[in-house]
Amino acid sequence: FGRPVMLENVGEELDPSLEPLLLKQVFKQGGVDCIRLGDSTVEYAETFRFYITTKLRNPHYLPEISVKVTLLNFMITPEGLEDQLLGIVVSQERPDLEEQKNKLVLESAENKRQLKEIEDQILKVLSSDGNILEDASAIDILKQSKSKGDAINVQQLEADATEKEIDVIRMGYKPGAYATQVLFFCVTDLANIEPVYQYSLQWFSSLFIMSIEKSEKSPDVPTRLDNLNEHFTFSLYNNICRSLLEKDKLLFSFLLTVRIMKSKGLVNEEEWLFLLTGGVMLNNPHENPASDWLSPKSWNEICILSGLHAFEGLREDVAANPGPWKKIYDSTEPHKLPMPSKFSKCDGIERLCLLRTIRSDKVILAVQDFVCSIMTDKYVKPPSFDLTACLNDSTCASPLVFILSDGADPMASIQKAAEVNNKEFDAMSLGQGQGPIAEAKIKKACVEGTWQVLQNCHLAPSWMNDLERLTEGFTIGVTHDDFRLWCTTYPSPVFPVSVLQNGVKMTIEPPKGLRANIMGSFKGDPISDQDFYQSCTKPKEFGRLIYTLCFFHALIQERRLYGPLGWNIPYGFNDSDLRITARQLSMFLDENDEVPWKALKYTCGECNYGGRVTDNWDRRTLLTILDKCYNEGVTTQESYSLSSSGQFVVPPDGDWESTVDFIDGLPLLPQPEVFGMHENADITKNQNDTNRLFATLVLTEGGGSGGGGGGSTDDKID
């Protein structure tokens, strides 16, 4: 029939049966063009066209495939996205203008069509045989064509003038569209970090429209755009953070801040590149003036940095006056000290570059301060895990995907959500031979409106294409409205991109940081349940001990960040340990007249948490930490200190909300002393965090974000 055909969502390898089609192996049979497809011979029409699409972000096709097809990059460009977003914001803010604009576009197209018809008619008359002056009908046609053409031209001029007026008003909203497209490309570059960080333009646009509706209105367009940008940026941050692993949340805040600054021309690309890489110097001709404390690596970086315009004279200043620089090197908080001499005026990225050369272990802390100064501190406080909000954002056509990390188990959260919403759910773990069973269960759940949980999807790579096919068949209005598909997977490239883009992604792991960890525990099950929190017959003792239990839980999890200094063996303490210990605490307090310290310490330190510990020294450490949290002083003394510095104390007696407010006021960055360690224990941990941050940020560079000049980062790296 010669009609076009589209094959969607292919991978990097194509089915061999397509070979004759790609090579156009057409032959004559009975005077008719034919082609061989598998075992069949079919007629081939010249008007036939074959299109193939892929959703792979950066596919690599072998040369033998590339020579058989014409490759086209249909990834959206910054300019194209900006136009789309401009249309969205104007259609929401000024629907009258957008409607008029669309009407003018249609009128303009119609006018051009009519002019083309008139031209064709005139050409037909002029090309006819005979003398045109003797043909009265031809002269009438020419007169009518001229008058009609003149009228259309006048109409088109009026439409063009009106369109220009509309464009002037629309251009007032362009800064908002530009700022938003910068955020989109910032988000899409996250896929270079982990393959499961996939976000679709449709989801992004829906979130943008939601912000347009919810952000503060203003008759002044610039003020309105500022309100919209502020609301949308924070909404995007919250939505993205819930699907990021803890290790990447600060990175995203930093990347978001820098990309926004780049879009305003506030970042020097050479300084940014130095911050990420530190530069390379093979032979340094300049002698290290302070080799007793300044490492060769730091001195090389100082010499490289001196070559940048903003840091002229840095090498000479360090060589001539090493004393002030050594004060920064020796300080416990170098990120808070002003830089020596003329470099005291350096701030932002410049200050981070200087700190990288002298005390790179404190760059992480400086990055947090940097984000707070530019974007406020709410961008370094990721939202706590909220399964209810994620469930509300989902539909029967959008799967809910848990991105797992070591020790994470979301089944208890899913089970609790099913109980609260009075839903039936069935769970199964994927593996060899489980695909057909899973498909049957999904189809059954689609009809009955129940929840289906697929655990460990990364263990069934061969079935992932079938999962993608099944999810594409989910349709609102056809699939039961109450149906939900839950998937759990470790970060893996085998998980279908379309499921990730169309689904609601979540991570469930201990929040990074002592304060965030305690807050996450207090807002998790069962402590956040007011019936549970208020049910204990000894509210004073329970309120204090449940806080110290959360403090203990956070402390032993955060110690893992210190490597062998924290635990000889890294243990997978998780929320299930906290849940059972919290319930036992409430039960023991209810059943005894006095606080049963011995029973509490045994069940917590020897069974629930201690049952995971295999090393004798680790067990001794665990019990010592537990003694600080479970003792009579906690229940008898006011503001009992949980750390030697007194920064962490037991909160005043109160309800759940007052305790949460107290937790929110805890230090963002605790000192090592709270873990019972020397202040130098932070050096190795922070240095590793800094190296990981910069190595990961390099992966996000070279994307299509707007920026402050200086060429692309790819050019500079080359």
Image: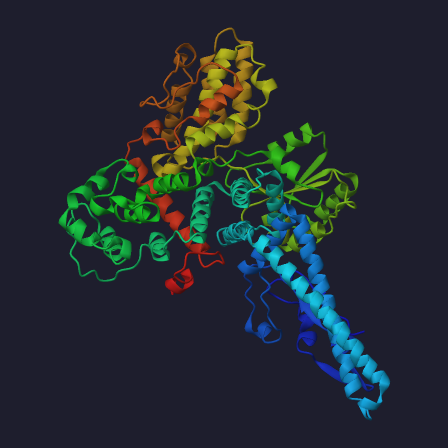
Q: Among all residues in the image, which is located at the extreme top?
A: 593
Describe residue 139's horizontal placement relative to residue 665 as left or right.
right
Query: At which x and y percent is residue 346?
Result: 29, 46
Query: At which x and y percent is residue 623?
Result: 40, 23
* Depicted 645 relative to depicted 388: above or below: above
Quarter holding the C terminus?
bottom left
Residue at position x 58%, y 50% in the image: 199
* Depicted 242 relative to depicted 710: above or below: above
Describe residue 154's horizontal placement relative to residue 623 as left or right.
right
Query: At which x and y percent is residue 555?
Result: 41, 29
Describe residue 399's horizontal placement relative to residue 384 as left or right.
right
Residue at position x 72%, y 62% in the image: 106
Query: Residue 140's quadrant in the figure?
Result: bottom right
Q: Determine if residue 603 is in view.
A: no
Q: How many marks?
A: 0
Q: Determine if residue 334 is in view.
A: yes
Q: Nearer the viewer, residue 111 or 332?
A: 111
Residue at position x 13%, y 50% in the image: 320
Q: Nearer the viewer, residue 339 or 40?
A: 339
* Depicted 713 relative to depicted 543: above or below: below
Q: Among all residues in the image, which is located at the extreme bottom?
A: 130
Q: Nearer the viewer, residue 277 or 591?
A: 277
Residue at position x 67%, y 48% in the image: 95
Quarter holding the N terminus?
bottom right
